[in-house]
Amino acid sequence: ITAPSAVSGSEVSAVNSLNFSGLDLVDGDRIGLAIGGDFSVETSVLHATFDTDLATTVANLAADMALEDVTFSAVSMKNNIITYTGPTDGTTMTVVKIKVDNELLDDIGMTKVGSTWKSNSAAGIEYATSNHILGIGESYDKEIQLQVGTGLTSTAGSAEGSKAGVDISGTFSVLSENGVNIVNVTIDGIDGEVAVPPGSYTGTTFAKALEERINLVRSASGHQVSGVTVDFDLDAQSFKITSGTVGPESFVNINGSSNWGLSNTEQIRGNTPTITVIKQATDAEGNKLFIDLDGNETTVPPKVMPTWSPVYLDKGELTYDTFGKLVSPKEGVIYSPYDPDNGSNLLNLSVDYGKNSTQYSAPFSVLSLSQDGYPSGRLDGLGIDSSGVVRANYTNGNQVALGKLILANFANPNGLKQVGNANYVATTNSGAPVLGEAGGDGYGTIQGGALERANVDLTEELVNLITAQRNFQANAKAIETSSTLTQTIINIRG
């Protein structure tokens, strides 16, 4: 919107303010106040003499307004700003305009006819209560309307199913055979199984029935799901399930029949937008630095409106104890002071989470516990499972995999050669060993802790046994002969 030079405006309310700091006024300058209208029609204009002593200016304005039977009274005066209670006609178009009264009125589209000032249509500026967001306290050739941003919103976890495997564009039947009416859900840490009653449904009524039953799911500790919505998309022929909570803790996982497009749905968590603090770069003297589109340092051209920056919150964490009470930060979060650069004091901003900040919008309780780690323990033994994995067993219940046994297969196992101590070696008759894992094709399984059947050569062992027996008998016969001979000799001597 193109505005006249040296014009500033703000809405009229019960209490408002006039900012003269940007108009470069000196004692004796004339100022004008237009009450009502937007200068597109003749309006009642009050004018007075400006004085750097704001009290004198207020007196001048009050006296001038009194002539128009309008009450004007100041509430406070500081730093070239007058806070006042002033006129209002109760309409949204009531405005107050301030203009330097000089001899070049036509140059800015303003003319004076009798006791009334007018402007051409190009010079008119319209401020409505609904869109007049920012007041402008300085003099520029152009006025820029800025859209004030709102707070960033956390999102909820939401799972979208795929296209239904059956036609659900009209009326369809839901049966209980093969569990097609069963849907397993996990909502914000609460698990449950939902059964949609058999019957005739449309996509909308099926979504409603599913939504009602999901919101009845309870955990073992008695916590109930709430706020979940189920929507049906007729064009996509699919269902969308949205959690009733927001932020990273909001979680939705759905697994049901492919008839309804609910099989293998993606697990979705909500999120909170990441917020970043933006700081102005300055040189050694504290002057602001700017760059052009090519990244080269440049200076600020004259009459450039000061930029504005949103206030971002630092990313951080809130820590709660087991009772759901806030542990840190105890003292809240304090941000760098903001200097409005208009003579006012620094603005200090801090966020105090207070004593009533809790982890959830409901009383705190433990929904689930998970173990992370084991107590101390000692080695209790070794074990081998059927797949050949060797595990160390500890007294605290922990098991640690140490390695894995491999098996060897041969084209002709009977061609192996025994080398003693239940050991065999490969030969040309047996073929080369083919390594593999227990339980694989062509390989057996391993039975840990079992006694193996003897695998020695029985024939060879029997022959060795007979030979040993014969040797024993021969030795025994030799001893017997020697004993007889000795006895005979003794008898002869006797």
Image (tube, helix red, strand yellow):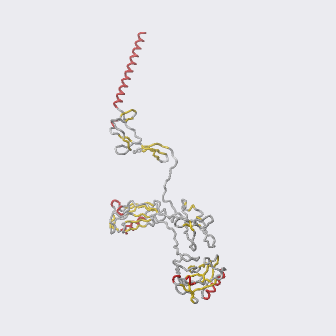
Which picture quadrant has residue 97?
bottom right
Which picture quadrant has residue 421?
top left
Residue shown at 62%/66% (left/top)? 286
Residue shown at 39%/66% (left/top)? 239
406, 29: nearer the viewer: 29
Location of the C terminus (image quadrant): top left
In this orientation, does residue 357 appear? no
- Measured as percent of width and height from the top left, residue 335 is found at 59, 65
386, 469: nearer the viewer: 386
195, 272: nearer the viewer: 272
- Measured as percent of width and height from the top left, residue 422 is found at 39, 34
- Measured as percent of width and height from the top left, residue 363 is found at 52, 64
Which picture quadrant has residue 36?
bottom right
- Measured as percent of width and height from the top left, residue 106 is found at 56, 84
Q: Is residue 11 above or below residue 389?
A: below
Q: Which residue appears farthest toward the top when viewing the image? A: 493
In this orientation, does residue 449 appear? yes
Residue shown at 58%/77% (left/top)? 139
Q: Is residue 398 above or below residue 74?
A: above
Total marks shown come to 0
